[in-house]
Amino acid sequence: MTDQPPPASSGDRPPTVVEPKRRPPGRLRRWLVRLIWLVVLASILAGIAWIVLHPRAAPPPRGRFAMNGTMPVVAATTAKGDIRIELKALGTVTSLATVTVKTQIGGQLTQVAFTEGQTVHVGDFLAQIDPRPYQLALDQYEGQLRRDQALLAAARVDLARYQKLVAEDSIARQQLDTQTSLVQQYEGTVETDGAQVNNAKLNIAYCHIVSPVTGRVGLRQVDQGNYVQTSDANGIVVITQIQPITVVAAVPEDELPAIQKRLHAGATLPVTAFDRSDSVKLATGKLMTLDSQIDTTTGTIKLKAQFDNQDETLFPNQFVNIRVLVDVLRDAITIPTVAVQRGAPGTYVYLVQPDNTVTVRPIGLGPASADQVAILSGLAPGDRVVIDGADKLRDGAHVTLPTAEPGAGGGAGAGANGGSGTGHHRSGGGNAGDDAKGEEHPHRHRTDQ
């Protein structure tokens, strides 16, 4: 057995020392990271709040808007002029006559006398069918006719003899009646033979095919040497009349009263045809007539215009844009269409005042023609309206104008150097001194050029 120390007595036990608890190092690090993120987030929120509550002043305007709060614009002066009231529509070119040349008898095609695409006139020779079978038939019918004519002549001689004998009471009355009937029978036979002869002559005439109309010959549908007959669907060729030619177009029914009024007054309405892009003028004609009823499915009515088409610019089934000159509005106040603005006041313009400020002026629009529009109310001759630069304007804004203004018909102004412009304002081309002079004297012209 090993020796063990005796248990210590309670009086000899050393005092117990209590140590403070320590947090693990990893937990402390996480708290520090969270604190840093909170500080960063607070800084960001504080910066956003400062930007919202203290907005930075806008930079001074540059370029075309850096003229002491004024804006450069181009203006046009209203004037009196004529407005052409035109009606636009999409039309289809149609021929006055389209004929499919077919044979009226059967036979071999022995000759084709036309060239594809050529222009033929009424009565021009087109094709020939072998006439020999029909000539033989004609000879047969003429022989029958001569034989029956001889029988008729003999029967008439006997009839005259029987009439004398009956008058002398030498023969029975019945014999005279029988001879009279025989003469009438021969007369009917002769008439039948004559009709057969004429029919054979007509067949021979049908062998010689001529043009029934004046027009352009299309593509040949059958070649020489083929056997043609009346049941052929395509025929021999198609001839289309193109001089003159017509255009059929549909217009809204709302335009009908104005057209009818002019037609009833005896006016001739000019019609101009343009190509599909509506940019190239093709021909000029006149309105011929209107359809007899309105199409209820589309609410339109068809009109027909005729063109001489001497240069053959219009072709059948071609799509064209037409313009019908319904009327001309004389001495109307006109402005360029680019000056018209649309918004809460309706249709309006920016009217330039004598102090070089603009005011919103509501206007009433009339008919428009090309780049001009008639003004029914709101403006007077000589008023100046903004035609370029109105997108940044407001009521009462100050503006500067070029040294020369465009007229109401053009929209082309002169620049500060005296050169002609193209309807666009000058944007920052001069120095500050030139801009200041232009602002102080907007209407002063240089005389030293």
Image (cartoon, rainbow, N blue to C red):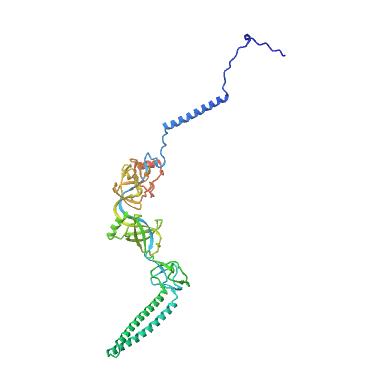
Residue pictured at 38% horizontal, 62% vertical: 94
Asked if 259 appears above or below 206 in the picture, the reply is above
Please provide percent x and percent y for residue 138: 41, 79
Q: Can residue 305 be seen in this view?
A: yes
Rendered image quadrant of residue 355: top left
Relative horizontal placement of residue 245, taking residue 15 as reference (left or right): left
* Relative to 383, residue 91 above or below: below
Quadrant of the image occupied by residue 202: bottom left
Q: Quadrant of the N terminus?
A: top right
| Residue 351 visible in the displayed image | no
- Is residue 379 depicted above or below 229 in this figure? above
Choose between 166 and 184: the one closer to the eye. 166
Residue furthest to the right in view is 1
Looking at the image, which residue sits at the far top? 11
Residue 302 spot, x, y in % from top left: 34, 58
Q: Where is residue 425 in the image (x, y as percent from the top left)?
A: 38, 46
- Observer-nearest residue: 147 or 350? 147
**Residue at the (30%, 53%) spot, across then down:** 81
Q: In which quarter of the image is residue 191?
A: bottom left
In the image, residue 95 above or below residue 76? below
- Residue 399: x and y, percent? 35, 42
Q: Which of 382 and 131 is in front in this view?
A: 131
